[in-house]
Image (cartoon, rainbow, N blue to C red):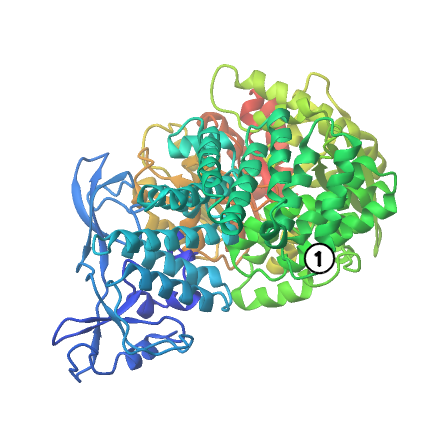
Amino acid sequence: MRSVYQSRLPPQLLAPDLFAMLSADGQIYGVCEACGWEHRVQLVGNYTAAKVGETIRRPCLSCGDTRGLGIAPHRLRVHGECLDCGSWSWLEVEHDLVRVPCPVCSSVRLVAREETVEPPFPVEFGEVETPLYMLRDDGPYVWGRSGSTDAQRLVAESHAAGLLPEAHRYIYLLIQLAVRLQTGDHYDDEGLYLITQVAANFCQGHLRAVGELEIGLLALNLFEQLIALAPDEPNRAIAQHSYAMGLYSLLARWPEDYLEQLTGRTGLRQATIELALEAEQTLAGYLAEAPEQVGAQLARVRFVIGDLLRVGTSDDDQRRSALTYFDAALTDPWVEQNLGRGVRESRAHTVMQLAHPSDELLQQAIADLQTILGTGSGDSERWRSAYYLGQLMVRYADDRIGTMHQLEQAAALAKQQFSAIADERQLLYQAEQFVHVFELLATCYADVSWNDEALSAVEITRGSAIRLYSRLADDREGWISGELDSSFEQDPIGPPVKALLRAHADVPTAFLSVFISDYGCTDPVATALLCYLSGPDEWQNKRHLWLVPDAELANLSAQRYFDPGPFRERLLRTASTSGSRALLEPLAELLEEAGVERVIVSLPGVLTRLPLEAFGVIADEQLATDRLRFTYLPSVRFGADLVGGVGAAERDLRAAGVLALGYDGDDIPAQSEELASLREIWGDQLTVIEGSDCTKESVLRALAEPFDIIHAVCHGSFDEASPLDSALHFTADRYNAARSVSARDLLMTTHFSTGPLVVLSACSSVVTADSRTNSFHGLAGSLFRCGARAIVGSRWPVDDRAAAALMARFHRKLRTTTQSPDLSLRTACAELREDGHRAEDWAAFGYYGVI
């Protein structure tokens, strides 16, 4: 696993010797030792340090010195203040201060007070050679003299980069170069305007490709600078339009209040609408001077005004106003020809968002979408229009087969895009969009009892990222071409289902997949598919569909995490009652008919943090499901991957080798009692690293050893904004990076060879990212990707005394019985409950993975 900065780079640049050559602007420079003139090295084609060395073995293009060039990396240095120990330090960093530890106390709470690049970037620099894709060779090019020609050069390079695999990675390097160029004061006003425009447009394109919020916010900042730099009113209006486009791109992906929080601006969308209206008024004043050119730009402004009126916290009145702007935009011939599909899609989707659209508007929306789909197969975004048309048919057409065919078309288009993605960030971003298509199609399949097809469809995106990146790099291409490229209608889901269930055949076991689709005109529709073995090579796939009241779903979503406090027990009971009513009661008959004792559950992301095993016990009305034990997985295919990857289950853990990681501090008073219990239970099978010896380095080194069980008793934290920064903390100082292990650390360094059971006696240790596709980003997802077979951990902050009591019971059963570890946990929780402990104590811990 790489840092955030490294994850944006082309893979070949991550080779240590090549990465060391990179400057702070993502480029490699060769410097003449005689005159100091710098030469930029083209990264395309120079994929190894040896190749770069060969490239710079040539005379200086400034003074002609023939001794060759030397590498001159420009490093970003930050003068950071530590908020914990108060020290100030100059630090050399890759990109920013995120996750850089203080050299004095190892805290990661550093604030940048000053930045510098050493050695400083020169104002002007040349190139080692003219790239082949530059059709003209006018001699050695010099950067920094003309903003206009530098901007043209950057655009030409971006066009060439667009032909490469994973083009967005090379565009990111051009973003770094463009931002570096536009921060200087060496260009005239026109040149600075053009360079800023190019940098902003690159960021906007990168956002569309990868969906990366940080780059989108940078684009917004650059567009704002562009408005201030505009040389005249028409260009200012164009810059205002670009800013409005930038904000719309963000609002289409993230909630309005979240963006306001990040930017520190309230009323952000409304202010941008007013900015776009100002641009509209300005351009209208110039329409008579250049009707064709200004008219096209005016129509584009009206297009984005319509988009801003329909996203975020818009209401029906604003959406109806948006329709008038879309109508006006389509009157322009240039927009009709070049942007017509986008305008029609926005107009159709706006109609779908209306509370009570008229028949005339519905017919217009259908016509718009059919027009888009009839324009050819080259547009990678056509899947969305096909999906919208399918949604309209689900809501208003009485034609099940026709609706399924339409959604199958949308799913095929989406899958075509999905199977072309090899980059993890793109995969996550696209999967979160495509999941709606596959889940709605799966709902329609289940509605006509095509249950196997339904499960195949929903499994396309569910757990896709964690499945792909749990594999070795060499296996990923085969997985993509072999599985994603196959047709899900013909892709049998049976083999992975049977593999998972056979591995859990110690007791009657079922796999339960639940997904929820929003039809738009009713409460959301929940679909459950329950799979269980009915013979040596036979299995059943039963389905049930029901409406989940919006209020119940909102209640479950709001209470999926339980903070400590006097009302937590009451909140847990309320959530359990809602969960029982919304999820378990409708399935009670299906579960009873299956006659199973264990249910392996795959829930949609928003519900993965809920303790289903507690619902039947602590709800206001208890259910027969109290007898069931629940375990959790991102998807059935990931479960089959786990079973196949770590081998047959070793349920008899009595002879296990156990690693215990302690805690250094007196704020978890029961941790000494917990470790003492482990010593008494496991004896010489136990290896203990005392809390005072638990550092990042020592823990990661210990995790490389072949243990069967790994137990950590410490603090845990979950970072909602950045799940890979979720961590185990071995001291009370949670900002002490040297005494903690994050989800990111695990991915960067750890690979389990024995498929261990990992037990995290720590707060919030199995909380994962709220992802509808079950990416499982967080400690649990990282441990799975490192090769863990199963994880026992808590869903919320826990009392250390209750945790110690539970863990002693759990480990004693592992040591003295041959029952499966999930049953050992279930029994330990039941004993804790019988001893009078509150539900918030025993219901916190869940079993994730396979037995």
Residue 444 picture quarter: top right
- The vertical placement of 266 against 376, above or below, is above
* Left or right of 501 on screen, residue 614: left
Q: Nearer the viewer, residue 257 or 51?
A: 257
* Left or right of 730 on screen, residue 84: left
Measuring from the top left, give residue 487's x and y in whole percent. 75, 60
Q: Nearer the viewer, residue 711 or 134?
A: 134
Task: Name the image quarter holding the N terminus.
Answer: bottom left
Picture residue at 48% right of the left edge, 37% below the top: 280
Residue 50 picture quarter: bottom left
* Left or right of 301 on screen, residue 20: left
Residue 769 shows up from this direction: no
Circle 1 — which element? loop
- The vertical placement of 72 against 567, above or below, is below
Number of residues whose C-alpha sits closer than 10 Å to that of mark 1, classed few (under 14), some (14–19) or many (20 or more): few
Picture residue at 60% right of the left edge, 51% below the top: 339
Furthest-left residue in this view: 34
Measuring from the top left, give residue 402's x and y in whole percent. 85, 47
Furthest-front residue in this view: 288
Furthest-bottom residue in this view: 66
Q: Amino acid at mark 1?
A: Thr
Measuring from the top left, give residue 424's x and y in whole percent. 52, 55
Measuring from the top left, give residue 308's x and y in whole percent. 54, 35
Residue 557 picture quarter: top right
Residue 753 shows up from this direction: yes
Picture residue at 20% right of the left edge, 35% below the top: 85
Per the image, the residue denoted by label 1 is: 375
Q: Nearer the viewer, residue 441 or 15?
A: 441
